[in-house]
Structures are given as structure tokens and as C-alpha cells.
Image: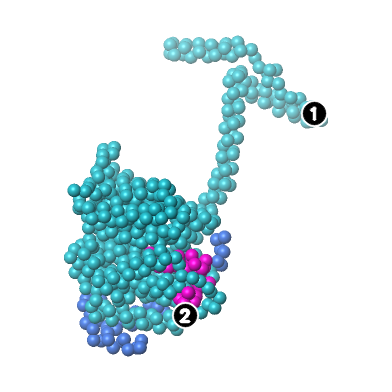
Chain colours: A blue, B cyan
Amino acid sequence: MVGLCIPFGFFSKQEHIVSLWHRIPSIDVLFGVLGALLLIAAARVLASFAEKGEDFYD
Amino acid sequence: MIKAVPPALIFILGALLIPLLKGKSKQVYLLLIPAVAFMDFLHLEPGTSWVYQFLGYKLIFCQVDRLSLVVGYIFVIIGFLAILYALHIQEDGQHIAAFLYVGSSLGVVFAGDYFSLFAFWEIMAVSSVFLVWYQKDKRSLDAGFRYLIMHIIGGCSLLAGIIIYVVETGSTAVTHLGTGPGDIFILIGFGLNAAFIPIHTWLPDAYPEGTFTGSVFLSVYTTKTGVYVLARCFAGADFVAYMGGIMAVYGVIFALRQNDARKLLSYHIVSQVGYMVAGVGVGTALGVNGGIGHVFNHILYKALLFMCMGSVIYMTGRRKLTDMGGLAKFMPVTCITCVIAALSISGAPGFNGFVSKGMVISSAVEDHKPILELMLILASVGTFLSFLKLTYFSFFAPNPEIKAKESPVNMQLAMGLTAFLCVFIGIYPKVLFEVLPFYPVHYHPYTASHVIGVVQLFMFVGLIFMLFKGMVAPHRATVLDFDFFYRMGGRGLVWVCVAPMSNLRSRLQLSSSRAVDIAMRLAKNPMMIVEIPAAYAYLRITQGFRYLSGYSSAETYNENIYRRPIGVGVLVAIILLFAFALIHFVF
């Protein structure tokens, strides 16, 4: 079902083509996958140095 | 014809009567005040009214235009819904604080000059802290003080900026500002309320510690008045636009690591306010409409999210995601409304967030700001990821131990009405477009590419969530933010005050006391000025001899032995006066 939504991107017309990625069909799939992985990784990196015990400030 | 009064006045005066009422009559009265305020809105005419002279400056309490009206409308609507949600609360103090908070926020929105804006700004800070303190535990007390300190600093910056601006321009009118020194101080003051990074820490620190009803009010007013004044004074500033992008991404990254449900929501306020700030910073008609439209929509779904989590906390006593799970079957109304709010904040088609979020991102595209566009898309991904986490781990994750009941009827009704508005605006955005500052609105949210793009984004973010659920699962921890540095700085300041400064004070006090003591002795006997060095030398010599000869005695000092008659002092004074006169007249 997830994969089925990809072809729809090839048939829809982008209204405002300003940047390069607006020309790529179904670019939002890539944004979704890469964005989610990037944010999970960023949150892990943040946790590696900024995460402390629950009672850290107490 | 009925003359409208400043809406702030209705809430502020309304707050004073709350303690006089009891039972059902009080509940009716609480709901009547926002209804009266809404009726008052219908009589507000564009332009300025309620103008007074103060120290040669104009105080304008009611400046009405499309921008102030749209923000005022949503402030009153959500005020009504939040009061409905908190209707069963017995403590008058909470209601009074909430009314003063709503009233002062409306005061800021309709203020036409910086002096009255500043006055309402400060009332807003002071009244809102009580919504945190009414939780009545140590954590809320401490968080409330930190909140207050940050807002006092922001208020000082705002006041300094206003004074510099007024001295430079001679005007107090709230208008568009630039990059002058006063303008920068004002921007810092506004930016603190809008949760600019890194002066945002008061928000995720204080909001989760408020009462469960107080947090609903808190989630609405302070940051949105910040966005409103930015739209009025700093629309089109690039710095503001990119600050919005940074806030949007920063908020979601921190939200992903949170375990406390309301702390997660608080970081999402930072992120969502980032969208509004970005739209305002872009400054085009679409950008400002998008930013203010997002204020309108965000107030609805964020208040709803705080209502839902407040409902869970109220009914289960649990605030951490690690302690929740499985609540969907026990609290179906809360669960359904929370899912609606989560879809709204994520910007799913059919919900209000889809409309305004699309406007802000489109404004960045149209204004040729590709980096900003990517930041906002990334934040959108993070928002959906976070709310998958929140709804899954609070309502759907297995938890055989949990037992709960649905919240009281007034809370369910408030949640239901707010959820309805989220869906209604999502399906019929024309209602929103008609009240936005720049009218008519040239934006069509439901285009094929927009809907398909968002659906694709959600599908694949959902897939990643399912695959990496373990990596975003909540766990017991505290994530340090910039507040770590402020707390360390605060501790350093306390240490400087307690140790070196206190020591310095003691030494100065001792030295001053000695100086006064010597001055008193000298005043008693001026001859001592001459005799002290001689007496000191004599004392040293005799002590030396005594030490060498091994003699010791416990002699006590008697000042009368050394004191000369007062006549000698007078004689010395006359001689000195004579010498002075001789020098003056002869030479």
C-alpha cells in the first residue's frame, strides 16, 4: 500500500517549480525516508551527549 | 449604537468578580465572559479608539485592523473552550489567573502604542506563572521562578528597546521596525516570548509543570502574542524567517527524545511557532497569511493536544509515556480527539494544519528560500514521527496494568468542540481565509500535487517509524537543553553572591565600622591626630622592651589618661584659623 502511492506522484503536476527537486516526481517519498532517518540519527547523536538520568537536576 | 470596549477589559474586570460567585452561577458566569467578549468583537470598528494622554504620549488601548481581529477571534474562541475544559476546577485563583492571562494577551493584541503593549505584556507574564504555581509542588514552584526570571529579562530588554526607540523617533505607535539599536532590543523581547532559539528554554521547562488545565491556556497565549507582534513589527525580516526554520527543526529533534508527554508537546510548540515565525519572516502576503493562519490553527490543535494529555494525566495520574499505553479502550473520546489533533498538527489532508502549513512552505518556495523550504519539510517529517510516537505509546502500545475512566463531561465536550473546529477548518478553509490579514487569499490547498505529496511523505515516515520504533521509543531520561548553561550560570551567580560578594560586604562593613569608630574618637579628641603616631611609636618601643625583658602585664587602655582638656583643642583650632586668615589676607 505504501509503495502504491509512488506512481501517483508521476501523474500530478507540480504548480510551482522553483528549485531542482520540484522537478523530480514523487520527491516527497525521498523527503519522508531521508528526513525520518536523518531526524532519528540526529536525535540519537543529541542523546549521546545531552541525555542524563531522570533526576539529573534534582 | 453600542460602543465596543477593549476586549481585554472584559476579561480583566470579569476576573475580579469570580470570587463573589459560587456553584452553578459561577460556572455560567465563567462561560459568559468569553461569550460577551465575542459579542464585543462584533461591534469593533477598524481604527483606533480608547485613546488617552499619558505624560505627553498617546496610550491606545483599542487599535483594530484585520491582523488584530483574526488573532483576537481565536484568542476568545479558545478562551471559551479552555474555560469549558476547566469548568470543574474549584480554585478561584486558577480561574482568576487564567482570565487575567487571556485579558492581558488581548490587551497586547489591541494595543496601539508600545507603553500599553508593555504594560499588558508584563501582566501576561505575571498572571501566567500562577497557572504553573497552582500545581503546588516543588518542581512547579522552581519552574515557575525560572519562567518568571526569563520573562523579566525579556521584559527588561523590551522596555530598554521601547525607551531607545521612543527617544530616537519621538513616536510610541506600534509600527514596523528595522535594525536600529532599540529595534534589536525589542526583537529580543518579542523573540523570548516567541521562543527563539536559544531563549526558548522557559517553555519546555514550565509548560509541563503547570496544572493540567493551566497548561491548556499556557499553550495558547504567550507564544502567539509573540508571533503577533513579530508580524506587526518585523514582517519580512530574513533573520526572523531563518530563525523560524531553525526553531521548526530544533523543536522536533528535542521532541523525539522526550518521555514526558507535555514536554514533548512543549517542544512541538517551539517547532510549530517556528512555522509561524518563518511565514512572518518571509513577509509576503502569502507568508504573513500563512503565519497568522498557522497561529489560528495551531491554537486549536495544540490546545486540544494539551487537553487530551491533561485528560490522561487527570484520570490516570501518569505523565510519562513509559507509564502509559493501552488507553484507547478506556478513554475513547480522548483517544479519538488526540488522533485528530495529531493529524492536524502533522498537516494531514482534511485537517486544519494541512492548510496553513502548506501556505507557509509555499511562501518560502515563492520567495526563493530553498533552505528554509527544506527545513520546514524536515520539521514536517519530524512532527509526524513525534505524533506517531505520542499516540502509539500513550493509547495503543500494550500495557496490561493500566486502568482508567473517561474524563468528566465538560472536558470531553471541550475536546470534542475543538476537534470539530480542527476538522471543519481543514475541510472548509474558506472560513479561515476570510479573516486573514491579507484578503482575498490567493492559495488553493487541495491541489493534486500537494495532497499526493503529503500522503507520500506520511506513508514513508510511517514506514520508517514501524521499522525503527525501538529507536524512538520513550525511556526514562532528561535531555539537557540550553537551560543547562543558564542553570550553571545561575548557580555561578548564586555562588558569587554567597561567597566572594558576601565576604567583600563583610570586609567593607568592618572597615567602615572601624573608620567610623576612629572618626568618633578623633572628634572627641582632635589632639589624637598628633599623638597617635607618637603613642603608636611609644607603644611599639615599650612592647619591644617588655618582650626583651620578659615582662607582661594586663594593662588596659584608658582614654582619659591621654585626653587633653577641651581648651587645648580650641586653642589649636584658633591658631590654625589665625594662620589661615594671615595667609589669606596677607598673601
Labels 2, 1: one chain: yes
Q: Residues within 10 Å of mark 1 (few under 14, many from 20)?
A: few
Q: Residues within 10 Å of mark 2 (few under 14, many from 20)?
A: some
Q: Vertical placement of B373 versus B181: above or below?
A: below
Q: Quadrant of residue B559?
A: top right
Can you say which quadrant of the picture contains the C terminus of chain B? top left
Report the residue at 44% width, 82% height from top. Answer: B466
Of residue B328 and residue B498, the one placed in the foreground of this image is B328
Q: Vertical placement of B283 versus A23: above or below?
A: above
From the image, give the main secondary structure of the stretch colored magenta: helix
Residue B331 coordinates in the image, percent (x, y): 45, 73
In the image, which residues are magenta? Answer: B303-330
Q: Is residue B329 magenta?
A: yes
Task: Identify the mark at residue B175; answer none if there is no mark.
Answer: none
Of residue B511 and residue B428, the one placed in the foreground of this image is B428
The chain under label 2 reads B
Alpha carbon of mark 2 to alpha carbon of mark 1: how far?
87 Å
The residue identified by callout 2 is B469
Q: Which amino acid is tagged 2?
A: Lys
The residue identified by callout 1 is B552
Q: Earlier in the sequence, mark 2 or mark 1?
A: 2
Report the residue at 27% width, 79% height from top. Answer: B451
Give the structural element (helix, strand or loop) at label 2: helix
Query: Would residue B161 be seen by someone viewing this image from the given angle?
Result: no
- Cβ atoms at labels 2 and 1 below 8 Å apart: no
Give the structural element (helix, strand or loop) at label 1: loop
B492 relative position to B430: left or right: right
Query: Would residue B57 be seen by someone viewing this image from the given angle?
Result: yes
Q: Is residue B225 magenta?
A: no
